[in-house]
Image: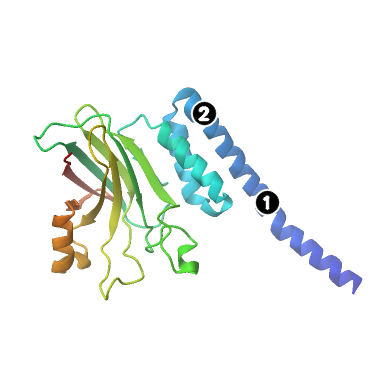
């Protein structure tokens, strides 16, 4: 019996110790990038933090994720960003947008927060367990600041539709775009794709038009899907 217990302890240590060591390494890297980003306005640190949170989401507490998300927001200096590494599961996409007012004037230095579901339709790994959509704590998210011409760009993966239907309908694949511009009301839009089967439903076509949600057409650019679009916002 004693030998059996010792064997169980050894197996437990063999399994858990590498995980604990790796988790510590991930947190050490995150701590380094959290210091590097505001100190040197490091673009590499910004990308690395996105990758760490996307790849190792469950190694961080909700508080740590919220603090890192806020750090990335207040230190956003760039009109483009990558929110996941090249090995993220799904079709990789590059979206280039332009933000205008109702008179066609480009809106510069505008903060846009975007977030999305993954290639399985979940915002976080816990969504599949709790049967909910964790929009408040998404795994894939990012911030951009539009340039002098109102242009911004996002590199990510194409999200899947939610596994759960809404009133019998499949919810379209979408990326949330929360736009905060000085002198304008906040605009919360959802970017959708014209080749998504769900967007063949007139209900969602009308919804996109009424809500001013951008409907984009993806084209193949090498191994990446890309699209360009415009968003017009009003006061």
User: What residue did someone put label 2 on?
Assistant: 36
Horizontal side of 100 relative to 159 (left or right) equals left
Instruction: Classify 218 as above or below 46.
Output: below
User: What residue did someone put label 1 on?
Assistant: 20
Q: Quadrant of residue 72?
A: top left
Q: Is residue 52 visible?
A: no
Instruction: Classify 63 as above or below 71.
Output: below
Numbered label tally: 2
Task: List the single residue furthest toward the left.
Answer: 103
Horizontal side of 71 relative to 225 (left or right) equals right
Q: Earlier in the sequence, mark 1 or mark 2?
A: 1
Disc 1 secondary structure class = helix
Position of the C terminus by quadrant: top left
Q: Is residue 153 visible?
A: yes
Q: Residues within 10 Å of mark 1 (few under 14, many from 20)?
A: few
Measured as percent of width and height from the top left, residue 147 is found at 25, 29
């Amino acid at each position: 019996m004693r030998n059996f217990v010792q064997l169980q302890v050894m197996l437990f240590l063999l399994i858990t110790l590498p995980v604990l060591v790796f988790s510590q390494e991930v947190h050490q890297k995150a701590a380094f990038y959290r210091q590097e980003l505001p100190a040197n306005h490091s673009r590499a640190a910004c990308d690395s933090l996105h990758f760490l949170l996307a790849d190792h989401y469950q190694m961080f507490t909700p508080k740590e994720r919220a603090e890192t998300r806020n750090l990335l927001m207040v230190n956003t200096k760039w009109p483009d960003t990558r929110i996941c590494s090249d090995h993220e599961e799904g079709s990789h996409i590059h979206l280039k947008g332009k933000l205008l007012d109702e008179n066609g004037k480009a809106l510069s230095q505008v903060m846009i927060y975007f977030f999305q579901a993954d290639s399985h339709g979940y915002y976080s790994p816990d969504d599949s367990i709790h049967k909910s959509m964790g929009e408040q704590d998404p795994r894939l998210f990012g911030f951009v600041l539009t340039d002098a011409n109102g242009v911004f760009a996002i590199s990510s993966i194409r999200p899947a539709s939610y596994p759960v239907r809404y009133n019998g309908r499949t919810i379209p694949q979408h990326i949330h775009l929360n736009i905060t511009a000085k002198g304008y009301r906040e605009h919360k839009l959802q970017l959708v794709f014209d080749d998504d089967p769900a967007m063949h439903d007139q209900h969602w076509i009308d919804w996109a038009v009424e809500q001013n949600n951008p409907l984009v057409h993806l084209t193949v650019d090498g191994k990446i899907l890309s699209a360009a679009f415009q968003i017009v916002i009003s006061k």
